[in-house]
Image (spheres, rainbow, N blue to C red):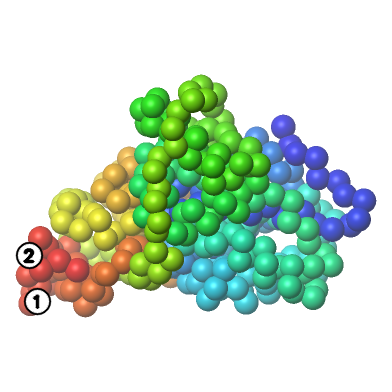
Amino acid sequence: MAEATGRQDGLLPLVIVGGFLGAGKSTWLRHQLFTRRFGRVHVLVNEAAEMPVDDLLLGRAERLDVLAGGCACCSGRADLLAALRRICDAGAVALDTIVLETSGIADPAAIARAIMEDPVLVRRIVLTRTIVLVDALEGPGQLATEHLARAQAEAADEIVVTKAAEAPAPNRSRLAATLRGLAPDARLGWADFGVETKVETDPDALPFDLGPVAEDSGPIQAHRLDAGSAGGWWALSAWLSALLFARGDSIVRVKGAVRSPAGRLLLQSVRRHVQPPEILPEREQPQEGEGDFIVLIGRGIDPVRLQASWDRFVLGHEGRAEGIARDDP
């Protein structure tokens, strides 16, 4: 059922959908578009790296734009504000809602502040809700070690815990208690594959002991690899498996689109947990720069070693790269 969207003040509602890397934002949002929760919607998808596949996944939006190559709360802020102004100028009468799906390294509070401080947008857009997704499996660790993951939860009006069925019941209860402590006024819900599900939790469960976490533990950066000339599906999958085994603590997220014998696949992982590949629909007209690619997002990744390892083990080029586990990126 669509949410009520009519407003007497003429302002266009904006919903921010956030969450840490790998929380399942696109999967969740795809189902909300299917159920028409937000009515007639213009979706803005922000990716920290160039990953032109989200528009295929979110094809049920009336309009969709991808803001790639910069996080909307910092380096991509100007692009976001410009995109919101264009939407307003194009005529908001035909829309019920703008939905902004943020990158996994965005702070929703910083985005809201940027909109409220913009002299044009503050008179044309109203932020009605910030929805933050939290991974039931990875969430406790992310909240314990990532200052940004906590900031995202604290900014939420609504928290949706994804992959609910995959976490043990005691952990779900403790995660619920933890999230209620971080955002006591936020509505807490649960979802599997984007579909809302009912989860019973122990109201007496103790929250996870998060402890202090450093605000600056090093930047999270994205590294893109061209897979258009990869030396076969099996070489790529073997390389990725070995890399995650060796450096899974440094690599927070992997996302890519790669041609395989089954078709073009969407590859995703969070830390060492690799999600089952999903076959992507084919475009009628391929877009420029839409070739096969892999994006690794993490900390402390040496781009030179990463590229050398990719060239040698996936592309089959001779080079000076050492074994992945010995001299990995």
Mark 2 is surrounded, within 10 Å at the Cα level, by few (under 14), some (14 to 19) or many (20 or more) other residues, namely few
What residue lies at 7% left-to-right and 77% top-to-bottom?
Answer: 320
* Residue drawn where x is 71% and y is 44% of the image: 38
The residue at 79%/75% (across/down) is 119
Q: Earlier in the sequence, mark 1 or mark 2?
A: 1
Q: Nearer the viewer, residue 127 or 268?
A: 127
Residue 60, position as x, y percentages in the image: 62, 45
Which mark identifies residue 319?
Answer: 1
Kind of residue sitting beneath label 1: Gly
As helix, strand or loop, the secondary structure at mark 2 comes to: loop
Relative to 125, does residue 17 appear above or below in the rendering? above
* Quadrant of the image occupied by residue 43: bottom right
Q: Is residue 292 left or right of residue 177?
A: left
For label 1, the SS is: loop
Asked if marks 1 and 2 touch (Cβ < 8 Å), the reply is no
Q: Nearer the viewer, mark 1 or mark 2?
A: 2
Which residue is nearer to you in this view: 173 or 304? 173
Could you tell me which quadrant the C terminus lies in? bottom left
| Apparent side of residue 98 relative to residue 134 in the rendered image (left or right) | right
Q: Quadrant of the N terminus?
A: top right
Disc 2 designates what residue?
326
Residue 257 place in picture, x, y as percent = 36, 56
